[in-house]
Image (cartoon, rainbow, N blue to C red):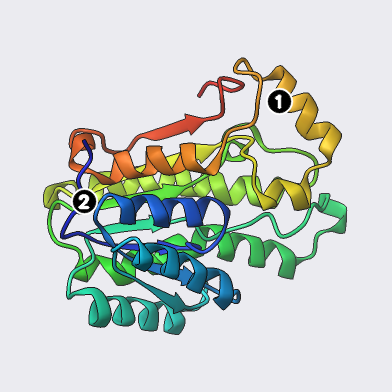
Amino acid sequence: MLELAQKVALVTGGARDIGRAVSLRLAELGAAVAVNYRSDAAAAEEVVRTITQAGGRAIAVPGDVTVAADVGRLVAATRAQLGGSIDILVNIAGGLVGRKAIGEMDEAFWDHVLALNLKSVFLVTKAVLPHMPDGGAIVNFSSQAGRDGGGPGASAYAAAKAGVLNYSRALAKELAPRRIRVNTVSPGMIATKFHDTFTKPEVRQRVAAMTPLGREGTAAEVADLTAFLASSRASFINGEAIEINGGIFFA
């Protein structure tokens, strides 16, 4: 059985979809969880309320993870309210923003997508590391798009998520002397508001039909994988990028 009692976890983008499921799963396993959000305070407070009503510890912490000052405040609030150390970092915050072909994309859009999905991982990780004890765990989120280039109009997103993959591998080597493990989760088609917003229903149906397991994945399934990687049960897994897509794509 996975056990995260006495651990403190920080989950960026922890209030919705996969982030929500991860926050809840880590709390179920005993971790105190800082649920980061950028603008939807009500969603973050709902996650915290669900955790605390079940007997867990959680706080909602606002912050734009593309802004260093916000990240500093996020880490400080987590330490002040949940404990001095941060044992687990899960970098989920990110997004497609919009589907744009290169001809439609300006420099500001490119910079925004790269900052949201890649720079954020750098900023939060850098801020957390001085407060992460040896033996901690970092789980970063990439995407199947980081492997296969994504769907139409997703080139900036795919580039950023590919960057997360290799940045995580580099960190896995750099932090190994401290026994801090860094792994990456790369979801495929997961039933979330992300795809409600950016993927046409007929495309989702076609992808589900092509998937060997015959369906979309769920946020809870991704959360289970994330919790495993954050736990001591994954103590010899480092620098790995794990696909969770029902078998439609193999790295």
Q: How many marks?
A: 2
In the rendered view, does 24 fall on the left or right side of 111? left
In front: 60, or 167?
Answer: 60
Instruction: Indicate which disc residue 247 carries.
Output: none
Secondary element type, mark 2: loop
Do the residues under discs 2 and 1 have CB atoms within 8 angstroms? no
Q: Is residue 16 visible?
A: yes
- Amino acid carrying mark 1 in the image: Ala
Vertically, is 16 above or below 59? above
Of residues 49 and 16, the one nearer the viewer is 49
Residue named by callout 2 = 4
Asked if 64 appears above or below 166 in the picture, the reply is below
Type of the residue with mark 2: Leu
Query: How far across and down, in percent of the image, does residue 69 sit?
Result: 43, 84
- Identified at 47% across, 51% down, the residue is 21
**Is 73 left or right of 176, judged from the image as shown?**
right
Label 1 sits on a secondary structure element that is helix
**Mark 1 burial class by Cα count in 10 Å: few <14, some 14-19, many 20+:** many
The answer to whether residue 65 is visible is no
Image quadrant in which the N terminus is located = top left
Q: Residue furthest top?
A: 212
**Residue 41 picture location, percent across and down:** 55, 77
What separation in Å lies between label 2 and label 1 (alpha carbons)? 34 Å
* Label whose residue precedes the other's in the sequence (2 or 1): 2
Residue, x 60% and y 18% (percent of image)?
213
The residue tagged 1 is 208
Q: Quadrant of residue 87?
A: bottom left
